[in-house]
Structures are given as structure tokens and as C-alpha cells.
Amino acid sequence: MPGRNAVKKTVVEVSSLVKDFKKLRAVDGVSFSVSEGEIVGLLGPNGAGKTTIIHMLLGLTTPTSGRVRIFGLDFARRRSRILQEVNFSSTYTDMPYSLTVQESLRVFARLYGVRGREEKIRGLLETFDLTEIRRKQVRHLSTGQRTRLNLSKALVNDPRVLFLDEPTASLDPDIADRTRKLLKRIKEERGLSILYTSHNMREMEEVSDRVLFLHKGRLLAEGTPAEVMRSFRSRSLEDAFLKVARGKEAGGKGAARP
């Protein structure tokens, strides 16, 4: 078994990523990596480029320039192979309204070729408190229930890399806390790598091994939550966030990168 200080594999590598939408540069030369078993938070005000980056890593949006490698493979050339071991959840996406909760998970389990599908689905339904509503159509679910269904779908194929966009935004405090603990447990047990966005600064501090602080498409600072706080001379990530959002930090000029 590798020692504690063993070098972990890089599973996501982003180099000089750029995305232009007509006259708007949404992502401006961003580079970073995510290691095996690491949780990395994408932090920044609205319009910072967080969701655009995740969409490019999923192949939903084509980069203007730059390079993405996942599992050491070039994403542009090996997209189908890579996406078999990746999954995604967002508060802002939904399942087909006419399917039930259980049917939705069965569809995605089949698409990913999951073995022991029914057992896997039962476990996810129980984990996210969906068992009692498993026969309920998606159209009749509350926002929080839909979020829990999306998170269940995101774990159905036991991904090696998970991309999460505001994963706990519509969850009540109990389910949100359980979700964070579940993700951290899976990370420890299976070496799951997670890249996620959130506007919940306390959540960022709690679960992130590293934070990437973005503003207007550029990477201002990166490091552990404590290192990023120090780089902005702030007592918390929330203080750092407010400084940037309110224009009290020079837009990335000379920003410290621990």
C-alpha cells in the first residue's frame, strides 16, 4: 500500500484554457490540475467562468483554445472513453419529466453499463432519501428532490471524476450535510476526484482540499482554503469573495498564488 506521502496521479489537467462568446472572453487562459482523491472547489462571483469551465470539461462547450487531458488522455480525441468514468450533477439540469425517480436511475445505469444495477439503485435511493418517492414522476418532485435525484444519477456509474455545479444549493441543511459527508467518504474509500462550484463559502472551507479563485475568467489565486484566505488578507473565504465581488481587489493584478 502506498505511503501517506506518495505522489498522487493527476486525473484532470487543464492548460491555457480559453473560451470566447462573440465579444466576451468567459475563460481567459486558465490552467490547473486535479489529483486522484482530491476535492477542488471553483470559487468566484457570477460570471467568473466556473460553469463554463465545467461545461468544457464535459464536452458540452468547445474551448476556443487550450488543452484538456483527463486520465492522461486528450479529451478532444478520447471523449467517449473518458466520459465512461466521469459524471456530473447540477442544480440547473433536470431529468425527463415523464419518468419516475426509479426509471430515471435505471436509464442512466443502462447507459453506463452498470453491473448489479438494481442493487446499486436501491443503495442510492436509500442514501438520498428517495426510496419512498421512487415511483413518483420527475415532474412532481420538489426542487430539493430533483437535486437529490441528480446527485444519485451522478454516482450511479461509480465515477473516477465527478463534476458538481452548485450540488447542495437547494437541499435542506440535513441532506446537504449528509451529501458532503458522503462525498468525502467516497473520496477516501475510492480515491474519487471532485471539481465543484458553490456559493456556500463555509461548505468550500469544509470540503475542499484546494480552492481555485476565479474572477472575470482569470485565475486570481489557488491553494488550500487557508492559503487563499491569506493571499487576500481575509479571515474567511466569504471575506475574500466579498472583496473581489465588490471590486476591492485589483482584478487579478499581482494576485498571490500560494
Image (cartoon, grey):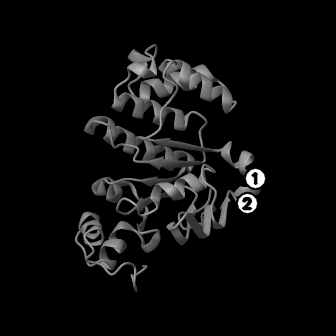
In the shown orientation, is residue 200 left or right of residue 83? Answer: left
Horizontal and vertical percent position of residue 59: 63, 51
Q: Quadrant of the N terminus?
A: bottom right
Q: Quick check: 160 above or below 93?
A: below
Find the residue positioned furthest to the front: 23
Provide the residue designation for mark 2. 74
Secondary structure category for the residue under label 1: helix
Horizontal and vertical percent position of residue 179: 38, 40
Q: Are marks 2 and 1 in contact (CB under 8 Å)?
A: yes
**Please, what is the three-letter code of the amino acid marked with disc 2?**
Asp
Residue 18 numbered mark, or none: none
- Whether residue 114 is visible here, answered yes or no, is no
Find the residue positioned furthest to the right: 77
In the shown orientation, is residue 118 left or right of residue 187? Answer: right
| Residue at (47% x, 33% y) in the render | 94
Q: Quick check: 189 above or below 135?
A: below
In the shown orientation, is residue 31 left or right of residue 236? Answer: right
Provide the residue designation for mark 1. 78
Horizontal and vertical percent position of residue 258: 42, 79
Instruction: State how many labels appear.
Output: 2
- The quadrant holding residue 142 is top left
**Please, what is the three-letter code of the amino acid marked with disc 1?**
Arg
